[in-house]
Amino acid sequence: MLKLRSLAGSLSSNLCRLASNAHLDYSRYPTLQESDIEETLMRGSGPGGQAVNKTNNCVFLRHLPTGITVKCHLHRLASKNRIEARKILLEKLDVHLNGEKSIAAQQKALDQKKSTERKRRQGKLQEMKKNWQNREREESE
C-alpha cells in the first residue's frame, strides 16, 4: 500500500513537472554536430584516490564555432561523462545563442511567476485570517 502511494505521488509530481514544461518553447533549442566538437579525455581531480589519479575519465569538450568549453567529471565512467558533458554543452550553447529565449531563462521566468503567485496567495490568506481575528475580538467585546 505504501509503495502504491509513493508511486502515485511520484507520478503526480512528474505530471506537474511535465505540465510546467509544456509552456517552454523548444523550437530554438540548438543541436550539436559532432564535427563542431573537439573532445579530450584527461585525468580528473578530487576525491577517489587511485581510480581518479590513474584513469582518463574526465571529459573536456570545446565547441569550435563559439569557443564554449565544458569539463565534466561527475561519474567514474568516461562514457557517462561524455553524455553528461554534451548535455551541459547544449545548455550553455542554448543560453549563448538564445539569451532571454533560452530554456533556462524560460524555466526561471516560470519559477519566478509561480513564486510571486504563491506569495500573493499567502498574503491574501494572512489578510483574511487577520480580518477574521479582528471580527472575533469585536464580537467578544
Image: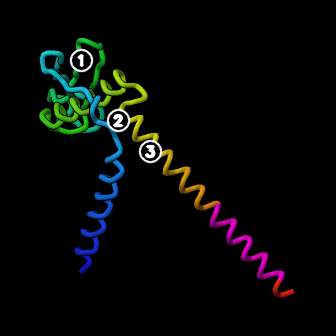
Place residue 78 in its image quadrant.
Answer: top left
Residue 40 location, quadrant: top left
Above-or-below relation of 51 to 124? above
Q: Residue 62: say if magenta.
A: no
Q: Which residue is mark 3?
A: 110
Instruction: Find the magenta span and give its range.
Output: 124-138
Residue 82 x %, y %: 16, 31
Q: Which residue is mark 2?
A: 103
Q: Residues within 10 Å of mark 2 (few under 14, many from 20)?
A: many
Identify the amino acid type marked 1. Answer: Arg
- Name the spot of residue 7 as percent of width and height, x first: 24, 68
Tell me the tag on residue 62: 1
- Circles 3 and 2: CB distance less than 8 Å? no
| Residue 120 position (above or below residue 56) | below
Of tags 1 and 2, which is closer to the observer? 2
Spatial separation of the CA atoms under disc 1 and disc 2: 21 Å
Judged left or right of residue 45, residue 98 is: right
Residue at position x 25%, y 26% from top?
Answer: 30
Say which amino acid is labelled 3: Leu
For the residues labelled 1 and 3, the Cα–Cα distance comes to: 31 Å
Residue 102 in the image, given as x and y percentages of width and height:
36, 31
